[in-house]
Each structure stands twice: as structure tokens, then as C-alpha cells.
Amino acid sequence: MNEMKTPADQKKKNLPYGGYYQNQIPDHDPFLTETGPGTPTGDYMRRFWHPVCLSEELKEVPRFLMILGEELVAFRDGSGRVGVLHAHCCHRGASLEYGMIKERGIMCSYHGFCFDVDGTCLEVPMPVGEEEEGQRLAKTIYQGAYKAIEQHGLIFAYMGPPEEEPPFPYWEGEFTCHPDDKLVPYSNVQTCNWLQVQDNAADQYHHTPLHTTAVIKGYEQGTTFGEAGAAAYVIRPDLQFFPVHDGRSMAWTSSRRVDENYLFIRINHQILPNVSFHSYLFEDGKASKHFSRVHMYRWTVPVDDTTCKMIGWRAIGPHIDPRDVGNEDLVGFEKIDFLEGQCGIRRPERATYDKDDLPVPPKHHRERACYRDSQRAPGDYEATASQRPIAVHALENPMKFDGGVYLSRKQLRDAVTERNEKATGAGWKEWLESVDGKPNTYCSGNVLKVPIGDTPEEEVERRRIVAQRCIQAITDADELPTAERASFIKDKMAEIERDYAK
């Protein structure tokens, strides 16, 4: 019998060989981690638009999806419209994943009930002479449906109350994408709870150990920044975290001294409830760069409480990636190009599948053909999925640079509990309407010609002040039109360089 530990026993947990005093695992935090129907965080998340699948997943047959614990089907009807419906037919429960896609809507293959993309019942088949009875029944029923829109190869759905639907957020109009670049969609399943994957985006301190040193020599597989040519990321960062947009999001700076002359200030932006924007992923820090924009756009969408998907876009092209390091062929379903170890399926396996026969993602991080390889060179997938299916926050021992994780969780809790009214679903809707559905992002990559401080103490202070000035420049420009805003921020970056010129 496993007896409960006493308070005195708990004090013994910090002992050599003291595993016995740590062998009871507390429950996870259901308030933040569980997102099914009727849960507090699940209800909050349903007030936002979420990408649910790639456009390429919609074939001649419906696509079964599980999103926020709900069984759904997505399809494109013969007229080109996208529908996202409850999977089980409201007649007798047969799954519409076996339905027949029609010119208008979808037909349940069991009894022939037809539904439009908004859930309207279009037809209840009846014998000749009894058609009116079928028409009357059709007017009384609706198949559960969610509004869907398509953007740059992603299907987004709004799963909340129709009367509370917010504007779709077109971040900075066209998602900051330069006309010479394009947005390439991807979707990577993660076999763990959504929050620990979202936490990982706010944890930039893992870059140096996980993506630099965590590989057995001779077993390199592209999991490290050195292999990707991103030399600037090898340096351990100095992190600062800033609540922005009235607590609706968080910007954080990771400052790296590249050499005696250059300081790499990376700014990422994490947005409630499950969005993160990432600046240039392949930085070498060898030349000045001011206000480079978003390189990777990511939503962490819960599938259920122990599975989620990282889904979004990679910006590909000469403006965002002047070194031409990215590989569009390695961006898509169960694949992403910037580092290996981002999904359960590894190269080369994930680069060889047929787009008409998409691979089935693994169910567990240990149940993969690449398991041994991933032990020799782990990546983000292994680090997050191995925290248990749902990470247990009560067991954590935080360090200084975990601050972004805890600030992000606090922002989420304050929004769900309505402690921060501006971050509630209603607060978001009001704000998005006030900015015409085009909010700004703080995300940017900056390499500034700022010489190293004369002493270690002066250097620490210098890189932190420079990072704060970068954040302040973006904040000061928030009300400016897009083109004017970019010029203002770049001028401020140049001003920082002039202030430190020797």
C-alpha cells in the first residue's frame, strides 16, 4: 500500500537518493489545462478563431477532426465552400466523416439527411408523395456547425456563441508578410497537453542546452542551431518579459552578445489564448538588422486534453530569409523545416509521404520508429511530450528565466477568471473592432551595432537597456499606420546604434 507522505516527509525530498519522498505525483491543474466543452478555459478559448486543419487536408471525402475535445468533420463542398460540422449526424448519430460531399453541403450516408455548411438541414429524403413531411422535419433541425474561413492554406473555425463572434484578426493587415514572401502552412501534432507546448514558446532559455548541446556526437540530425546555420542562437540569452496590449499578450526579449560589436535582440510575441509569433529563426548576427518581421506564426490548438497541434505558417522568401536557409518542401502536414525534432515524425520519413495519403501521427513519444534516434538528438517535441501527457505544475522548481512561462499562465488565468476584463472574450472583441481587425504584433528580429560594455556588469546593464528601448519603440508606434509605424521603429533602432557609437 502506498501510504501518504507526511509534512515531515515532504521536507526530506531534497536529499541525495531521496526519490522515495518524491514518488507521489499530484494532480495537474485542470483549470488551465482542460479545454473540453463546459470547462472554464475551454469556454474562454471558444471566443477566438482557431486554425483547425490545413486546406490540403480537405479531399473528396470529409476530414475527421477533434478540436477542443469535440468530434468534428471539415469538408469543402462542390461549390468551394468550407464547412466544419459536428461529426455525428443529428438524426441517428452516424458520423459524417463517412458522408457524401455534395455540390451544396454534405449528405449523411446512413439515411440521406443533407446539411449545408451552416448546419441547415437541406433535405430529409421521403417516399414519393410524402416529400412535404420531410420538408417540415428539415425545418425543425440543425446539424451542429461552426463558421469557417480559409486563409493562406489554413482552415479557421469559430466555435463560440454566434452572437459573440469577434472579427477575424488579420495581424497588421496581411500578417506582416512582405509582398516578395509567402505564407506556407504547416500542422504538427503534439502528443501532450496544449499548455506545455504553449509554455515552450515562452521558454526561450531552452535554446542553448536543447538546440546546441543535447546531441550525441556522430548522431547529428538537424536538431541544433549550429547545424541550421543560426550561429547567433548558440549564445545563452538574457531574457526579459513585458506584458503588452493591456495584458492580452506578452512580448519578450532575448538578448545575445554576438561579438564585440553586435547585439542580437530577438523579440517574440505570445498572445492569448494560444498564439505565438516568432522572429527570424536562422539569424547569424553578422550584420545590422532593424525590425525584421514574423518568420513563424503558430497557434497551439487543443485536440483533446492530452493532444494538441502546432498549426500556422512559415514565412518563406527573400525578404524574411535573405540567407535562403528555409526549405518550403519541408513545411506542411507533420513537418516543419527550421529544426528537426518539432514533430513526432522525423526526416527523411516525413519528407516522403504522398499528399493524397497523409501519414498518421504517432500516439505517444515512445511509440515511434525514430524513438532511438530522438534519444540521441532530442528536440522540442521530445522535451514537451515527455513532461507527462499533462504537465504537473505543482512539481516545478522555477528558475529566473522561466518568468515568461509564469507570466503567460497568469495572463491566461486572469483572462479566464475575468480578473482582466480587457483580456476576456468580450474585451478582445471590443479591441479587435476598435482596430478594424488588424492588431499589431511586437514580433521582430534586430541585430544592433552596439559595442560590448567595458565590464561584465556594464554589459549586462547595456543589453537589458537596449532590449527595453526596443520594446518601448514598438509600443510608442502602436497607433501609427503600418508603413509609418515600420519607419518609426527602424529610426528608433538606428538611434540606439548612434547612441552607443564609439
Image (spheres, rainbow, N blue to C red):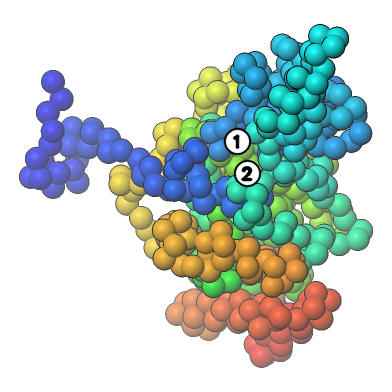
For the point 75% across and 69% down, the residue is 436
159 relative to 387 in the view: left or right: right
Quadrant assignment, res 361: top right
Q: Position of residue 308 (x, y in %)?
A: 57, 37
On the rendered image, what quadrant is the C terminus found in? bottom right
For the point 71% across and 24% down, the residue is 137
142 relative to 461 in the view: left or right: right
**Residue type at the position of mark 2:** Met
In the displayed structure, 243 sits above or below 1; it is: below
In the displayed structure, 50 sits above or below 398; it is: above
**Residue type at the position of mark 1:** Ile
Q: Position of residue 202 (x, y in %)?
A: 53, 56
> First in sequence: mark 1 or mark 2?
1
Q: Give the camera-side residue of 337 and 91.
A: 91
Q: Which residue is mark 1?
A: 67
Q: Residues within 10 Å of mark 1 (few under 14, many from 20)?
A: many
For the point 47% across and 60% down, the residue is 415
Labels 1 & 2 near each other (Cβ < 8 A): yes
In the rendering, which numbered label is found on residue 159?
2
Q: Position of residue 64 (x, y in %)?
A: 68, 25
Residue 326 in view of the camera: no
Quadrant assignment, res 310: top right
Q: Give the camera-side residue of 90 and 26.
A: 90
In the displayed structure, 339 sits above or below 135; it is: below
Q: Residues within 10 Å of mark 2 (few under 14, many from 20)?
A: many
* Mark 1: secondary structure: strand
Q: Give the camera-side residue of 337 and 109.
A: 109
